[in-house]
Amino acid sequence: MSEITYLTKEALQNLKAELQKMKSVDRPAASRAIAEAREKGDLRENAEYDAAKESQGLLEAKIQRLESDLANVRILDEGNIDTSKVSILTKVTVTNLNNKKQATYHLVSEKEADLKLGKISVSSPIGRGLLGKQIGEVTEVDVPAGKLKFKVENITV
């Protein structure tokens, strides 16, 4: 059984659109590629046919995984988020006490994480270290580069 995935409405819509594209565009394209490769002759020595079949198998696996994820989605409503402590969907401004730099992170599910947009997963080392913290608290986080100390400066939605 898959674990529950927490998403915003926007992320859910994006996943549904991705699944729809896979089923309506990518799947027929994979079938056409197989048909075209099949027309080129002997299937035992047809690398193009083998590649097309493998590509189709990978696509079907992605579709199955996405359908499974969507079956276990729970929608998070930003209106019900408690900003007295760091939790999923909160934006937390922290000061890195090692270099005195401030950063703002938006804590999201693994599927929505995108560091370029400032969105980090609640299951990442920094995300786990910040969860449950309140304004003014200091947390020490183990990251691959060593230990980082963060002070929570602000929490918003």
Image (cartoon, rainbow, N blue to C red):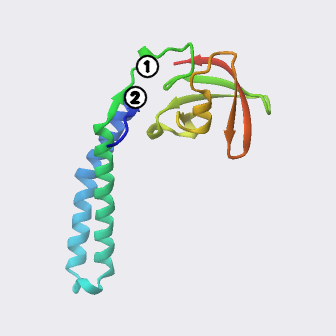
Q: Which mark is residue 141?
A: none
Q: Is residue 125 left or right of residue 109?
A: right
**Pick the front one: 24 or 75:** 75
Q: Which residue is disc 1 drawn over?
A: 78
Compute the Cα span from label 2 to label 1.
8 Å
Residue 141 position, x and y percent, is 68, 34
| Few, some or many residues within 10 Å of mark 2 (<14, 14–19, 20+) | some
Are the residues flagged by discs 2 and 1 in contact, CB closer than 8 Å? yes
Quarter occupied by the N terminus: top left
Q: Please, what is the three-letter code of the amino acid marked with disc 2?
A: Thr
- Residue under the point 21% across and 85% down: 41
In this view, the residue in front, 96 or 134, is 134
Tell me the residue at 39%/20% (across/down): 77
Give the labeled residue for mark 2.
Answer: 8
Residue 92 location (% of width, % of height): 60, 23
Residue located 26% across and 85% down the image: 44
